[in-house]
Image (cartoon, rainbow, N blue to C red):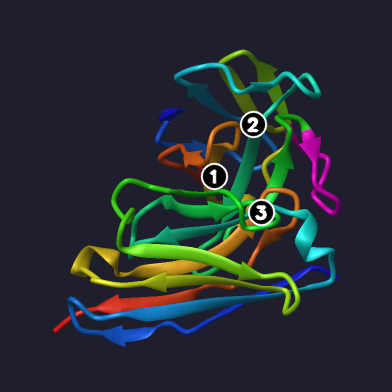
Amino acid sequence: EVQLVESGGGLVQPGGSLRLTCAASGFTFNSYWMNWVRQAPGKGLEWVANIKQDGSQKNYVDSVRGRFTISRDNAKNSLYLQMNSLRVEDTAVYYCADVLLGWGQGTLVTVSS
Amino acid sequence: DIVMTQSPDSLAVSLGERATINCKSSQSVSDSSNNKNCIAWHQQKPGQPPKVLINWASTRVSGVPDRFSGSGSGTNFTLTISSLQAEDVAVYYCQQYYSAWTFGQGTKVEIK
C-alpha cells in the first residue's frame, strides 16, 4: 500500500525557517518525480515544487523560488522541503503528492507573529 | 505557465442525475512520448486531503467508482459523474502535469 506521510509543520514567525519531510513507503520511491503542493486556509490547491527521480532537476513556483529548496534522499525514501524567509502568505497545509501515487495527509504550516 | 480554467465554479445536481465539470488548458498538454494528455482530476471532501480520481485524462484510479469518467483532448477536458451520490459532495480540481503542475480553481458540487 502506498503511503506518503508528511511531518515537520508548526507555528513559525515571519522570516523563520522550517523543514518538512515526506516519508514514502509501499512503492519504488526512486522511480518517481515527487511534488509538494500547498493549500491555504479556505483556498484552492497550489503546486509548490517538484524534483526528478535522481534529484538532478528541480522546479519551483515563482512565489517560493529562492526561499524554498526541495530535496530527496532515495536511500531513506524521503522527500524534503526546506522553507526559509517564511511569510504570512506561506501559511497552508503542505502535501506531498504524485498523480500516479496519490496524496499524503498533509502538515500544517502557520506563519504568524 | 499553463493556466487551467474550470467551469462552473459550483453546481447543484439532484441525486442520481449527471454532473459535468469542464476544464480548459491554455495550451496543449499532450505528451508526445505516449500520445496521452497529462490531465488529472482530484476530489477533495471537507477536512480531507485531495484524492486522485483520474489521470492521463481518462484513466480511472483503482477503487474509484465507475460513475466517474474523464474525457477530452487538445485543450478541453471533462469530468462526468454519471449518477450523483450523496458521498460525491466535494470540490473537484483539474490539474495538468505536462509542464510542472497547475490546478484549476476548483468546482464545488452540491446536492440540489
Left or right placement of residue B69 versus residue A26 in this view: left
Q: x and y percent of residue A74 in the render?
A: 72, 70
> Residue at label 3?
A98
Task: Compute the Cα span from label 2 to label 1.
Answer: 9 Å
Q: On screen, A51 above or below A11?
A: above
Query: What main secondary structure does the magenta stretch of the protein show?
Result: loop
Residue B29: image quadrant is top right
Which residue in the rendered view is the most extreme toward the top? B74
Distance of label 3 from label 1 (alpha carbons):
17 Å
Question: Disc 2 designates what residue?
Answer: B79
> Which residue bears the numbered disc 1?
B92
Q: Which residues are magenta?
A: B59-69
* Distance from Cα at disc 2 to Cα at disc 3: 19 Å
Seen at 67% across and 18% down, the residue is: B72
Of circles 3 and 1, the one toward us is: 3
Question: Mark 2 and mark 1, same subunit?
Answer: yes
Q: Amino acid at mark 2?
A: Leu
Tell me, for residue A104, which label it has, or none.
none
Residue type of the residue flagged with mark 3: Asp
